[in-house]
Image: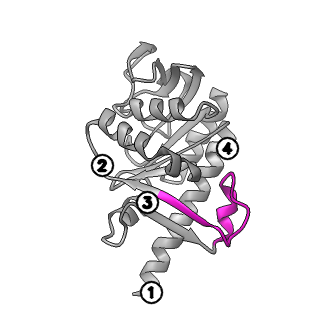
Amino acid sequence: MLDELLNTCDYIAKRNLCPATGGNFSLRLTDNQMQMSASGKDKGKLTAKDFVVCDFQGNWQQGDGKPSAEAALHGMIYQLSPKTQCVLHTHSMSVTVLSMLPSTDNKISFHGYEMQKTIAGFHSHEETLDLFVFDNNQDIPTLAELIKALWDAAHIANGLVVRGHGLYSWGNSVHDAKRHMEGLEFLVNCELNRKRLLK
């Protein structure tokens, strides 16, 4: 599964969804253990050696490097969603900008877009897909607890946004996580452009 994730990381980097050394990616290993991209790595050049093993609280266990400061957020998602096998965190410009607009409060709602059907559980453009937005917080355990409090509603999109920061998306496989990431990034880009045209 790591090889598939590495291919996905390369795909993400080539589309400039993780500029500089931003973003982080992980795989579930056990009920309290994950494999995660090490902090500060160029996401366009990741190899298997650039992943470390840590627990869901973000404590390093094995590998060369240290887990991202956001490891506990990945861990919280795995704890809240036992079927989730992969978490992707991207830093696209579209997500960052849309989340900072005054009109974006605690969620971005999509309605009428065919691409909503890329998200597991959604079968029609006539449904409303709510992508929840959480205020950024450098205290990651506190941010993780805020997400936990709204998880019942927030998890339905298979993704969430941290304001001014980026998108977290997940799935029951690397393939599913990538599909959700692509779908949500596309929808955010559509909504941002729609707002520009309506001005």
Q: Earlier in the sequence, mark 2 or mark 4?
A: 2
Image marks 3 and 2: residues in contact by CB distance under 8 Å? no
Type of amino acid at the residue the image marks with label 2: Asn
Tell me which corner region of the image, top left, top right, bottom left or bottom right, holds residue 105.
Answer: bottom left
Assess disc 2: are there few (<14), some (14-19) or many (≥20) residues with their C-alpha within 10 Å of its C-alpha: some
SS class of the residue under badge 2? loop
Cα–Cα gap, marks 3 and 2: 13 Å
Q: Which residues are magenta?
A: 113-131
Q: CA distance from mark 2 to mark 4?
A: 26 Å
Residue type at the position of mark 1: Leu
The residue lying at 69 percent from left, 59 percent from top is 122
Q: Residue 126: x and y, percent?
A: 67, 73
Q: Which of the two labelled residues, at mark 1 and mark 4, occupies the earlier sequence position?
A: 4
Q: Check disc 3 and report its element: helix, strand or loop.
A: helix
SS class of the residue under badge 1? helix
Kind of residue indicated by mark 3: Val
Binning the other alpha carbons within 10 Å of mark 4 as few (below 14), some (14 to 19) or many (20 upward) gives many
In the rendering, at what x and y percent does residue 39 appear?
37, 30
Residue at mark 1 to residue at mark 2: CA–CA distance: 28 Å
Q: Earlier in the sequence, mark 3 or mark 2?
A: 3
Above/below status of 119 relative to 77: below
Tag 1 near tag 4, CB within 8 Å: no
Q: Amino acid at mark 4?
A: Asp
Q: Which residue is mark 3?
A: 95
Q: Position of residue 71 (x, y in %)?
A: 41, 30
Pointer 4 or 3: first along the chain: 3
Check residue 136 in the rendering and tell me which mark sits there, or answer none: 2
Q: Indicate the quadrant where residue 190 lies.
A: bottom right
